[in-house]
Image (spheres, rainbow, N blue to C red):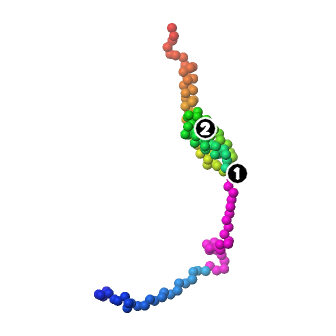
């Protein structure tokens, strides 16, 4: 390197680069990776299956049952389970949509129904046990 630096105005003139070769042409046969003309694009419109009303009812009743099922005596939870099973039957063949809503309603319904049934039968059996079992102390 020489000091002082060379004068920038006395540098070599710009040399153009050789031309870039054309991209590979696959030939007369079209390939899947080639871009198709805009007029060849198709838009496919499909109609969605109607939603199952039972699935929507199951989901709504399941949410109501979880939020206030104990205050409403568990009735929304039981209805959510019933409507959920009906909706699963409706959505099985694919003519109606809403299978996810039906499953969610079933899960929410069973979350409240199973503990309620367990509590009911344990209290019922406890009351039945105390009514049948005589007192241990004899009466004079």
Residue 80 drawn above or below residue 35: above
Tell me which label, 1 or 2, sits earlier in the chain. Answer: 2
- Residue at 67% of width from left, 72% of height from top? 39
Where does the image place residue 82, in percent across and percent down from the top left? 65, 39
Where does the image place residue 123, in percent across and percent down from the top left? 55, 27
Alpha carbons under labels 1 and 2: distance apart: 27 Å
Where does the image place residue 126, in percent across and percent down from the top left? 54, 25
Quadrant of the frame with the N terminus? bottom left
> SS class of the residue under badge 1?
loop
Is residue 112 in view from this perspective?
no
Identify the residue position indicated by label 1 in the image: 95
Residue 95 drawn above or below residue 29: above
What's drawn in magenta, residue-wise? 26-49
**Circles 1, 2 touching at the beta carbon (< 8 Å):** no
Residue 70 drawn above or below residue 24: above
Q: Quadrant of residue 77?
A: top right
Where does the image place residue 16, in percent across and percent down from the top left? 48, 88
- Residue at 58% of width from left, 34% of height from top? 72
Mark linked to residue 61: none
Identify the residue position indicated by label 2 in the image: 76
């Amino acid at each position: 390197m020489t000091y002082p630096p060379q004068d920038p105005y006395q540098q070599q003139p710009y040399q153009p680069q050789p031309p870039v070769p054309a991209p590979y042409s696959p030939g007369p046969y079209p390939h899947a990776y080639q871009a198709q003309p805009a007029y060849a694009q198709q838009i496919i419109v499909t109609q969605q299956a109607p939603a199952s009303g039972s699935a929507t009812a199951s989901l709504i009743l399941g949410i109501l049952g979880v939020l206030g099922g104990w205050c409403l005596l568990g009735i929304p939870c039981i209805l959510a389970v019933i409507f959920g099973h009906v909706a699963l039957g409706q959505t099985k063949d694919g003519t109606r949509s809403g299978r996810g809503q039906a499953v969610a309603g079933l899960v929410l319904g069973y979350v409240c129904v199973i503990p309620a049934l367990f509590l009911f039968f344990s209290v019922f059996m406890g009351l039945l046990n105390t009514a049948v079992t005589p007192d241990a102390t004899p009466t004079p």
